[in-house]
């Protein structure tokens, strides 16, 4: 555990946001409209990691604000959570690949340090990886999402001990009703997983302390 106060954590995330904004480590910086750093509660125990911004995310500079994002919000609401209060949402890539093509290995490697530093600052207990790219990157295994989804895995991510919880990507669920049902089923396991992890770390559960005070999403502040 780092000994950052919530204010220091937030300040460091804002500094990291500025680094991402100025980043030209890969050619995607030339074609993006806005970098998509991430948003949510910087003190959350829960993090979601998607693949890369799409057209709407690129336009707004915010993660998961298109159709897949609406589904993500609906799934969160189904377990009594909101992205603002209970989670931090980020992506493997911070810039949109043209035409929403797959992230390329060199782009993933260029962007990886930013995701790792987000994890080091936020120190989530549980990271839900959404889809193949986030899952393979953070598990360090080539095994695809269909075989690992819904099964928690203890891992070290950039020096932070976390439980990875691989889930289907919401965009895949929008295309295939059977995948949507599996995603809903897996989502229902998130509250218990979080409670287990909080108990193991001797942290108060949500039920004990009520909803935590949300830290303002760093990116929203900066764009305001
Ligand atoms: N898909 C992703 O993986 N991330 C987003 O932010 C939006 C769609």
Image (cartoon, rainbow, N blue to C red):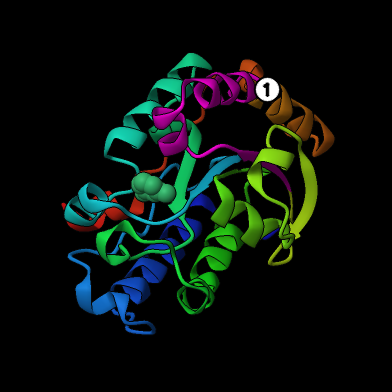
On the image, the x and y values in percent for residue 88 come to: 47, 44
Q: Nearer the viewer, residue 176 or 32?
A: 176
Can you give x and y, in whole percent of width and height, for residue 37 in the image? Answer: 36, 59
Asked which secondary structure carries label 1, the reply is loop
Q: Position of residue 64 (x, y in %)?
A: 34, 42
User: Callout 1: few (<14), some (14-19), or many (20+) C-alpha neighbours within 10 Å?
Assistant: some
Q: Is residue 202 visible?
A: yes
Q: Which residue lies at the image location 41% right of the left edge and 34% below the top edge? A: 83
Q: Is residue 193 left or right of residue 124?
A: right
139 up-or-down from 131: above or below: below
Q: Quadrant of residue 98?
A: bottom left
Q: Quadrant of the N terminus?
A: bottom right
- Tell me if I can see residue 213 in this picture: no
Q: Is residue 12 above or below residue 179?
A: below
Magenta stretch holds residue 71: no
* Residue 187 is a magenta residue: yes
Main SS, magenta region, reads helix
Farthest-out residue, right: 200
Of the pair 7 and 1, the residue shown nearer to us: 1
Disc 1 marks which residue?
Answer: 189
Q: Position of residue 80 (x, y in %)?
A: 49, 16
Q: Is residue 166 above or below residue 185?
A: below
Question: Which residue appears at 43% of the width and 18% of the height?
Answer: 77
The residue lying toward the viewer, choosing from 39 and 48, is: 48
Q: Residue at x 30, y 75 (%)?
A: 28
Q: Residue at x 36, y 66 (%)?
A: 17
User: What is the number of callouts on the image?
Assistant: 1
- Which residues lie in the magenta part? 163-188
């Amino acid at each position: 555990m780092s000994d950052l106060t919530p204010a220091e954590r937030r300040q460091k995330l804002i500094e990291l946001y500025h680094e991402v904004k100025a980043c030209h480590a890969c050619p995607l910086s030339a074609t993006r409209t806005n970098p998509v750093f991430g948003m949510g509660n910087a003190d959350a125990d829960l993090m979601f990691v998607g693949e890369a911004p799409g057209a709407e995310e690129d336009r707004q500079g915010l993660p998961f604000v298109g159709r897949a994002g609406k589904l993500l919000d609906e799934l969160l609401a189904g377990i009594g959570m909101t992205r603002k209060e209970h989670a931090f949402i980020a992506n493997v890539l911070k810039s949109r690949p043209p035409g929403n093509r797959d992230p390329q290995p060199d782009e993933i490697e260029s962007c990886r340090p930013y995701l790792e530093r987000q994890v080091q600052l936020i120190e989530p207990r549980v990271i839900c990886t959404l889809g193949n790219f986030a899952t393979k990157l953070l598990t360090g295994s080539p095994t695809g999402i269909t075989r690992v989804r819904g099964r928690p895995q203890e891992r070290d991510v950039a020096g932070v001990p976390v439980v990875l919880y691989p889930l289907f990507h919401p965009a895949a669920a929008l295309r295939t009703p059977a995948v949507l049902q599996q995603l809903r089923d897996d989502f229902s396991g998130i509250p218990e997983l979080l409670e287990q992890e909080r108990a193991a770390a001797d942290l108060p559960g949500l039920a004990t302390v009520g909803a935590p005070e949300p830290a303002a999403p760093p990116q929203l502040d900066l764009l305001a």
